[in-house]
């Protein structure tokens, strides 16, 4: 029988009424057997996510040795949910034990993980399902990286024979035996891990939007919905800022060819977006699938005559940045030029040191820094086979009077990336959208 793993995000867990809706969704399909939940999210604009309340608990704990004050709104939130659902569980006791353990563990990750823990305990109660604590079944290695082999085995052993089980998202256990979280939004990764471990036929990711849109709706009025994406397109779009799904959540499912379906808890009748392996992927008929981008990059531009014939030039430059522990996002290059594109935030005051290091390492003719750069990625499988796509892209940007400062075409021909001034970001996305979608 087909098996679906369903992950419900924070807004799907925000209050008792919505959780009752989630219960209906799960019970309407017998294949929906393994459930992963996030901590309760915002109920209204200005509300605070439980995870953020918990980070404040840790701050209080660090400075005063207790988290009594900051934990109070967490308690109010969960007591409210239990009351709205009319559950019989002794939530006061569970909350008290949780607070004591937070104070004992004194760890930021552990504190943050309790939102998912409590959410999953409640969901298991609502469904009459088995609660499987991810602290016992999801593992990280000694470098802090997710340990797939060990985790898949443990998840599958724990779920064996269970008809219905609930897992808390976002966390697992580190090599030191302590609770460790994925990065923010990481319950999406937990969902993918559980789907892979249990050989699911589908990973449903239930959120508060009806799938991916062709670009940010804050920039363009009602952009087109994307019906189908390939794993690669998804990776490109979510890495560049489309935040429906955590960018790392495709890795576990991709290996096992498990499709992901993005669904809307508040409009379950909508199809959403399917994310599928390339062999199932059907192009939507449009050359471009989606456009996404991010602001605030710094470009370090390096020029040296005959750079291309100097063996080891790039390695030496990259080593300087590596030694400062800074990740490089892109390395566009020409014959006598290369650029390093780095997220400005990651530079963390080390720019001067890096420039000095590069000068020492390779004696360039010029090193120039261009700040406040936004990167915009135009993504689509159709782009590689369709003549003139880049001409259309660059013409549209030129017609909008925007100066392109950098171009990088991925070798998979799946995307073209342009760098423009931060101030031109919004106008540039609009211009590209109009060119490829508004006809
Ligand atoms: N609750 C965590 C966060 O706010 C993880 C998640 O929601 O996926 O980042």
Image (cartoon, rainbow, N blue to C red):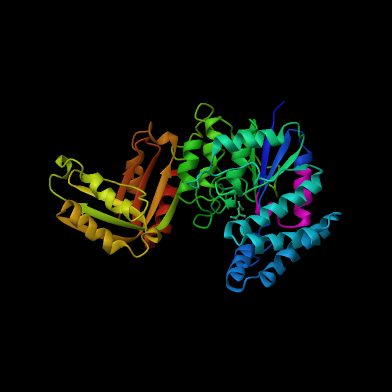
Q: What is the x, y in percent for residue 375? A: 38, 53
| Image quadrant where residue 48 sits | bottom right
- Residue in the image at 56% along x and 34% along y: 149
- Most foreground residue, 90 or 342: 90
Q: Is residue 170 above or below residue 288?
A: below
Residue that extends furthest to the left in the rendered view of this protein: 305
Indicate left or right for 94 with 234 as reference.
right
Residues in magenta, as a range: 9-25
Q: What is the x, y in percent for residue 189? A: 57, 44
Indicate left or right for 159 with 86 as reference.
left
Indicate left or right for 301 with 72 as reference.
left
Q: Main secondary structure of the magenta part?
A: helix
- Most foreground residue, 434 or 8: 8
- Residue in the image at 63% along x and 59% along y: 105
Any magenta on residue 14? yes
Q: What is the x, y in percent for residue 408? A: 32, 45
């Amino acid at each position: 029988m087909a098996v679906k793993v369903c992950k419900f995000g924070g807004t799907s867990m925000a209050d008792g009424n919505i959780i009752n809706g989630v219960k209906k969704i799960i019970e309407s399909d017998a294949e929906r057997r393994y459930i992963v939940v996030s901590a309760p999210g915002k109920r209204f604009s200005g509300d605070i996510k439980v995870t953020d309340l918990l980070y404040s608990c840790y701050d209080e704990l660090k400075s005063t040795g207790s988290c009594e004050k900051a934990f109070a709104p967490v308690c109010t939130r969960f007591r409210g949910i239990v009351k709205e659902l009319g559950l019989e569980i002794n939530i006061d006791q569970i909350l008290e034990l949780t607070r004591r353990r937070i104070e004992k563990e004194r760890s930021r990750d552990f504190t943050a993980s309790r939102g998912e823990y409590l959410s999953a305990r409640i969901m298991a109660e609502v469904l009459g399902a088995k609660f499987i604590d991810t602290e016992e079944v999801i593992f990280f290695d000694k470098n802090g990286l997710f340990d797939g082999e060990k985790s898949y085995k443990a998840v599958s052993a724990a779920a064996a024979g269970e008809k219905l089980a609930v897992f808390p998202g976002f966390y697992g256990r580190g090599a030191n035996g302590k609770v460790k979280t994925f990065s923010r939004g990481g319950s999406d990764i937990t969902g993918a891990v559980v789907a892979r471990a249990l050989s699911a036929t589908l990973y449903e990711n239930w959120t508060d939007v009806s799938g991916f849109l062709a670009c940010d709706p804050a920039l363009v009025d009602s952009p087109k919905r994307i019906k189908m994406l390939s794993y690669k397109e998804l990776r490109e779009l979510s890495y560049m800022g489309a935040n429906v799904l955590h960018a790392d959540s495709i890795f576990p499912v991709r290996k096992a060819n498990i499709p992901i379906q993005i669904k809307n808890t508040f409009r379950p009748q909508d199809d959403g977006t399917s994310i599928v392996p390339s062999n199932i992927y059907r192009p939507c008929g449009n050359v471009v699938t989606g456009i996404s981008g991010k602001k605030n990059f710094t470009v370090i531009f390096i020029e040296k005559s005959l750079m291309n014939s100097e063996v080891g030039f790039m390695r030496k430059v990259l080593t300087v940045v590596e030694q400062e522990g800074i990740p490089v996002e892109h390395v566009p290059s020409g014959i006598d030029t290369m650029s390093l594109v780095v997220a400005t935030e990651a530079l963390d005051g080390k720019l001067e040191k890096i420039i000095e290091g590069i000068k020492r390492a390779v004696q360039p003719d010029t090193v120039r820094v261009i700040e406040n750069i936004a990167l915009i990625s135009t993504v689509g499988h159709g782009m590689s086979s369709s003549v003139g796509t880049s001409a259309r892209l660059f013409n549209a940007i030129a017609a909008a009077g925007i100066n392109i400062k950098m171009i990088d075409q991925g070798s998979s021909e799946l995307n073209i990336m342009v760098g423009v001034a931060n101030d031109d970001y919004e106008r540039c996305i609009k211009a590209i959208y109009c060119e490829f979608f508004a006809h």
